[in-house]
Amino acid sequence: MYTASDLRKNLKIEIDGEPYVITDFEFSKPGKGQSLYRCRLKNMVTGNAFDKTYRSNDKFKKAPLEERTMQYLYSQGDEYHFMDNKSYEQIAIMADQLGDDTKFMVDNMDVEVLMFNERPIGVTLPNFVNLEVTRADPWAKGDTSGTDTKPVTVETGLQLQVPPFVEEGDKIQIDTRTGSYITRVKE
Amino acid sequence: MPVEQLSENNLWRRAAIIQAIRLFFVEREFLEVETPVRLPCLAPETHIEPIRSVDWFLQTSPELCMKRLLAAGHPKVFQICKCFRAQERGKHHLPEFTMLEWYHVGSNYLQLMDDCEQLFRFLMKRLALQFTSGGLFAVDTPWERVTVADAFSQYAPIASDAALAENVFDEILVEDVEPHLGINVPTFLYDYPADLGSLARLKKDDNSIAERFELYVDGIELANGFSELTDSTEQRLRFEKEQKSCREHGEIPGPMPERFLKELDFLSSAAGIALGIDRLVMLLCGAEKIDDVVSFTPEDL
């Protein structure tokens, strides 16, 4: 159990059987009044957010969350299949729960799967992934458009801007938090 | 003090502000005092949790000792000291913070409001500091004075006495009222419901109102002052009420401040105020949070 004085940004608590993360937090206390803990809470499954003010005698259940390292195996339609690296147990996560994360996932990649009450609710990707460029327009020398980047598509379907020297078949490193190009990698 | 340091460094500004505050009170013939920080008993207050120090407590405010000094025959006293309150940590809160308190025999809460205006104007002039909110402390603009009842009817969805009855006064004050206070000029929010002024005198013509005020600047509460209750029988009843309320909140109240109650009868009329120095420095430095104006926060230690 948490008490109100444990509340802070990024704390994860369970409300009505659902996991919530505190995305904004402020402690207030008017004059001789009581302590108020003003929170913005985001449902970790649906993404819905709401504001709520708690008092010092409020109690909170810790959200039973667990991260497990799993290997991404393959996708079939909307289902993405993963295997627990320790127990070899296999699970499926739906595409809409993964959101944009699917644009960075390639077969056999290790990810951290967040489990809530044994139910997978999301994944944490490595900060950087190496992906192959599957489509790149050749750089037209003498291009006078004034830009020093060009668009390419990588194996997962993600499109991004890269420097002109990147070509089809190159592997490039991408920051999964921003979706931006970092460097070309030689393998 | 080197001018370039004052314009750039919050610790230099803090020092200059505290030195100027001292000068203000010394020039007005206030006696600067130091009272013990460790005390065997405090004024019981439901929502202020003291920090224990062996079998005694660290002060949550020097209030009781300051009033005992008034009763002992010192008509004008001030103190700049550390106060301690458990579990208070936020953008505007530290569990150990610096308080300015001043007390004046024969004064009342309306005169304290005037004191505040004079103190701030003195500081602005002396330090030639500019508030970031721009013109907030313009010397010639009179400050806003609004009663709690009026502020609630202007900004809140329900009246102040209804909010109190429904036990949502604090929430509504913080969420709906405070953000509007002290925006263009500093605001005195005054005439609190009697229940919210445990040590304050009630108005002569309306005993549902305590002669208490809070000073707000930029939505931030800066000071709390009141006409002092000097009737020890009434004060004892109020303390007993606070102790009862502490128990209802599952806390064990400390012992009754008997010596204070005994000496209170020697005091005729007086007024006193507590002002948060760290928050004042924040405002004068344009700092976003209290952390930016202290040498170390608890997390730094």
Image: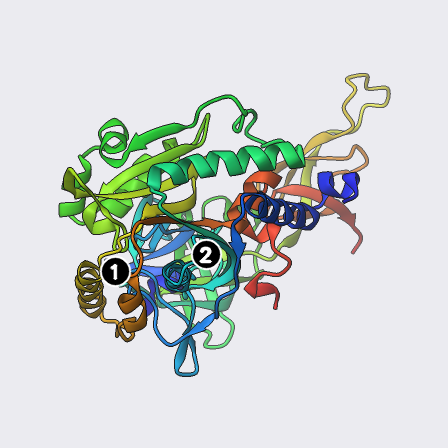
Q: What number is the disc on residue A160?
A: none
* Lateral position of residue B238 relative to residue B21, left or right: left
Write down the quadrant of residue B231 in the picture: bottom left
Q: What number is the disc on residue A17?
A: 1
Question: Where residue A159 appears, x then y in whole percent?
Answer: 61, 36
Q: Relative to the observer, which residue lies in front, B150 or A150?
A: B150
Is residue A41 something one can see in this rendering? no
Question: Where residue B245 appears, x then y in whole percent?
Answer: 19, 64
Q: Which residue occupies 48% across, 69% down?
A: B37
Is residue A139 something one can see in this rendering? yes
Q: Mark 1 lies on which chain?
A: A
Question: Where residue A19 appears, x then y in whole percent?
Answer: 33, 58
Q: Is mark 2 on a helix, strand or loop?
A: loop
Disc 1 or disc 2, which is closer to the eye?
A: 2
Amino acid, disc 2: Asn
Question: Where residue B128 appears, x then y in whole percent?
Answer: 66, 32
Pointer 1 with pointer 2, Cβ within 8 A: no
Amino acid, disc 1: Gly
Q: Is mark 1 on a helix, strand or loop?
A: loop
* Lateral position of residue B157 relative to residue B13, left or right: left
Residue, disc 2: A10
Q: Relative to the observer, which residue lies in front, B33 or A69?
A: B33
The way the protein has been coloured in the rendering is rainbow
Rendered position, A150 above or below B212: above
